Image (cartoon, rainbow, N blue to C red):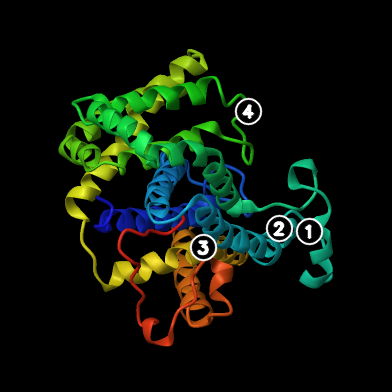
Amino acid sequence: MQKCRRHELDWLRVMAFFLLILFHSGMPYVTHDWHINNSETSIALTWLWDFFHNWRMPLLFMISGCGIWFALGKRSAAQFLKERSTRLLIPLVFGVFIIVPPQVYLQRLAEGQNFDSYIAFYPHFFDGHIFAGGNFTPNHLWFIYSLFFYSLAALPLMLFLKSERGAQSMDKIASVLSKRWGIYLTMIPLYISLVWLNPYGKEYVFEFHHLVLVIIGFVIVSRDSIIQSIELQRKKFLLIAIIGITLAIYVHYSPIVFSRRVYYLPNVIGYLSLLFAIFGYGRRYLNFSNTFIKYCNEGVYAFYILHQTITVILAYHIVQMDLNLWIKLLMTTAGTAVFTLIIYHFGVRPFNLIRPLFGLKKAHKKTLEFQPATAGRISPV
């Protein structure tokens, strides 16, 4: 069952991370405050980015849950924890101390603070957490420590479902979820987590619904019958997604103030349906491999770690130019993609001393042309 590689998960992961890079490249040009802000913003772009924001991270958490299923297939709990610590915590520590500080430095410069140099600023990076008026922050790397924490929190349940006794329970769950409309039972814990278990709903706090999404991802790839059912119902999921998201937008922008319970109902139905549609269409059309996806699948984690610092550096200079907003957006996006690729391909990928800092396993020289993953294994993120 898990011996066959799920190539569509590679494609979906790469597409989700590339969407994340595009998303951050556009943040200086929307009406929301970001690290660097352009003087001119676009309301239309803001609406589109708000749409992306509602499902881009949930998609990544679900894919990460899929990855945990495969990772536990050939590892003990101790081996799994060692693998997670190596591939998540090492890049996190390296990223927070080396990759993130330039972002904060340029943000403070854009806000009018002065420093003699980046070296002079660096000690001030540790002057308290950013939420308390300081500078210390993981910024975009919050996803890594969140995923590590969710992996620990969900591990007892996942180990049980992997056990002989748990497999019997999993078979029963799969028989229900594989039926028509059955997959929507996963909406219940997701809705509960959003309405009652996330009272703060702010950045960097424990978001219980992300943990639920990780578990949903774990469950839907545990049995072929579930993912096959999702594939067969993909058109229905897409239609329901359109209806649900439309209702959620209406409730959000309506002059009538609705409660969280009312707002999150069409929101959960719409965006969860969209995620299922993405998995269904991915299963249908992306279950193949080639050199491009093998290269991207290996490098996408490093891309994620690197990209936002490059985006902030570029945006800091580009927003000061007297150019059209859309030209600035194109320059920021293209520049982020090109410079991230160059740094990864020539500065990270070839060097075994550097690869672990970006979550990559050491590689033999002969495999650096491209390095396909072993069957059934997918990246920790």
Query: Which disc number belongs to residue 105?
Result: none
> CB of mark 1 within 8 Å of CB of mark 2?
yes
Q: Secondary structure at mark 4?
A: loop
Residue at which label 1 appears: 125
Where is mark 4, residue-wise? 200
Mark 2 is on which residue type? Val
Residue at x 15% of width, y 38% of height: 232
* Of callouts 4 and 3, the N-terminal one: 4
Secondary structure, mark 1, is: helix
Check disc 4 and give the amino acid type: Tyr
271 left or right of 182? right
> Which is more N-terminal, label 2 or label 4?
2
Viewer-side residue, 275 vs 70: 70
Judge whether 122 appears above or below 60 on screen.
Answer: below
Q: Earlier in the sequence, mark 3 or mark 1?
A: 1
- In the rendered image, residue 312, in percent from the top left (x then y), is placed at 60, 61
Say which of 270 and 29 sits in front: 270
- Measured in 3D between alpha carbons, the distance from the residue under mark 1 to the one under mark 4, in whole angstroms, is 26 Å
SS at mark 3? loop
Looking at the picture, does residue 104 appear above or below residue 52? below
Q: Which residue is mark 2?
A: 104
